[in-house]
Image (spheres, rainbow, N blue to C red):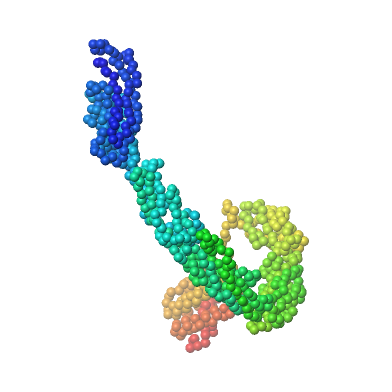
Amino acid sequence: MGSRAPTSLALLTLPLLLLLPLQVNLINSSQENDPGEQTKGDGHRPLRRFKRRWVVTTLELEEEDSGPFPKLIGELFNNVSDDRSLVYLISGPGVDEYPEVGLFSIEDHKNGRIYVHRPVDREMTPAFMIHVDVASRSAGEIMDSSLILNIRIRDVNDHAPRFPAQELNVSVRENHTAGRPVSQMSAVDLDQENTPNSQVLYFLVSQTPVLKETGFQIDRNSGEIRLSGCLDYETTPRFTLLVRARDWGDPPLSSTATVRISVQDGNNHRPTFPQKDYEIQVPEGQVSPDVLRLRVQDRDSPFTSAWRAEFNISSGNENGHFDIATDPETNEGILNVIKALDFEAHPSRSLIIVVENKEPLFSCEGGEPRRPGLVAASATVSVQVLDANDPPAFHPGSIIISEVEGARPGTQLGSFKATDPEGSGVRYHLAHDPAGWVAVDEHSGAVVTRGQVDRESPYVNDSFYSVIVHAVDDGRPPQTGTGTLLLFLSDINDNAPTLHPGSQHLEVCASSWTAPLLIEAEDRDLEPYADPFTFELDTTSGNAGGAWKLGESQGRSVELFMLKSLPRGDYLVPLFIGDRQGLSQKQTVHVRVCSCHGGSTCVAEAVRTEPGLLLGFLAPLCVVFLVLAVALFFLLRRGFGSGAKRHRCLVPYGEGQQTLVMYNDESRALEAPAVGRSALPSPVTQVSPAPAVPTQPLERWTGGIAEMLHQRLRGLGVLAEESGSLPRIYTEEGECERAETLSSLAVSEQTLPVGLLD
């Protein structure tokens, strides 16, 4: 390889207008021989490699430079002027990347001259970082690491301070204190921060209207607007201020904004009563709303807190008979009677009513709003109570009497005492006595029992029985007072224990007969006349002692055991249950032993029909079958009368003889005995029609038979209704009875109604 001369690159600083260059040099910091290099050339000089180091500094470029463009801003140079083997390359933002492509360039890549092509806006891009590389011209190989060149845009005062809005609306209370901030102005300058170009000052240009005693001021540095003096809504409800914001740049730039201040009415006028004295009349014993309306006057703005009135009764309402409220629409005070007045106690009253605004009152003194020491406006209301017939009053209103339950009729319980405020007579009447146990004397109010009292009555609640008595006066109209007597009944041992409803009927599976049955008892009496209970089997009746056994008493319950397996059926287990005092009575437990088929619940059995119900169900069916049988019988007789040979029970048997044929229908058939010729003619030709068979038309027969059956059935109904009628015993359906002759089966003429055979 040929020898390579050492090179050094540097950025040439040029004394250009609007350019403040700083050197950026590529220097040779050291030279070292590479022992691995071979020597070439005539002088056999060794090939040397030089280490390079980039020294990075920053260029400043003034923003909004007017040109001409392109303008040289710096140069990269080669200290070996005849060395043309290197080229320079630049890249990065402002060259080939966002935000401004093509802003900077280098000339033909043959020299190190860097140019800018247009004005730069610092507020858009305050700085650029460009990559500078040196490469071999022939091979294009990068010869060293990239140089990072920073180009900073120097700010110029090209932006004036700007307010967020050109107009600002502000509201301030009329009682706003002087010196306190009213509003805060704020303007923004887009120039470089912390420089004179972005520092803002505020000025109050004008105020409309201009008042001698009221004005506004603005702080030059903070932009805070303050009030001086007092505001008066009634004279000046609005102000207009013109405010300017200016920076410290060279030259300074500024802008303005308008501030419109609206004064909100405050309470600088107290409410007053146009009338100082009022007189009203109120009936006693009544709650009366809206008995008086008190009008007030206020010069503040209507329907504001400065105008809204608040009323108070400062005197005369010690017992709370009155209250006063404000009408939201008219701002009037509404006086109400909320507690009934008593003419006899106070026939007249005097109320003092004061009024203030909801918002505190203020006044301007010495240019400052202050709280005045004025007394609130007041008015006097004279109240006359109208006398009315008051109801009698009980003294006391309720009395409590203690008595032992079971007290006999005529027992004195106590007396009511009621008086009439007007002094008229009082009569007592019983108003509430649900059990009908007491009576009250109409004149004296004495209460006595008229029936035996029972603490366990459903009308007694927690041993208390309530009686209400009315006292009625002789007024017009009469008035009624109410008194209450609470009768406390002390318990006595007048109730023996009884079986709990859930223990009166018990079931047990035949397969689980060894399992105990729980029997529970209850007592309507209280302690000490109730539990613990004693349980004892009644062995005097039946075989209870041999089949059942009781376990130990558990206070209110006991276990019942079967001593042996009993057949399925219903059993009665009598036992005596006694309370703590020994009062007992006999009770019976109904135990059903049933089949469970592998479960623990009795299997339902077929419904058993009571004999009376069965008879009532079958009776109509029997009547229907009886009517059908009679009709069939007469149809058969008609067939015999017409010569038909259809018969069922009579068939030829032997020559010239007839007999009965035996059947086995439904029930057993009775053996037919031999019939003698004296009872039954032997030749068929000698059998004459039965004398009982009538010769009248069939229609008359059927009508007569129906009437006869109706009378007979009606007679059966009458017998069924008679309590003394004995039950009838009927032959089972299908049983045969002996018939002596065929003529005995006929219906005789005596059994037919009169006129049927005519």
Task: Judge by depth and name the residue closer to the eye, 108 or 37.
Answer: 108
Q: Is residue 255 above or below residue 288?
A: above
Task: Judge by depth and name the residue closer to the eye, 173 or 717.
Answer: 173
Residue that appears at 65% across and 52% down: 515
Determine whether, in the image, residue 14 is placed left or right of residue 315.
left
| Picture quadrant of residue 508 | bottom right
Determine whether, in the image, residue 482 is placed left or right of residue 676.
right
Pick the quarter of the image with the N terminus: top left
Task: Judge by depth and name the residue closer to the eye, 282 or 354.
Answer: 354
Residue that appears at 60% across and 69% down: 313
Horizontal and vertical percent position of residue 92: 30, 34
Horizontal and vertical percent position of residue 355: 56, 69
Horizontal and vertical percent position of residue 306: 51, 65
Count of marks, rendered view: 0
Observer able to see residue 586? no
Determine whether, in the image, residue 53 is placed left or right of residue 113.
right
Q: Residue furthest front?
A: 212
Residue that appears at 45% across and 58% down: 215
Residue that appears at 75% across and 65% down: 493
Observer able to see residue 204? yes
Task: Judge by depth and name the residue closer to the eye, 517 or 103.
Answer: 103
Horizontal and vertical percent position of residue 257: 37, 54
Q: Is residue 479 above or below residue 461?
A: below
Q: Is residue 426 above or below residue 543?
A: below
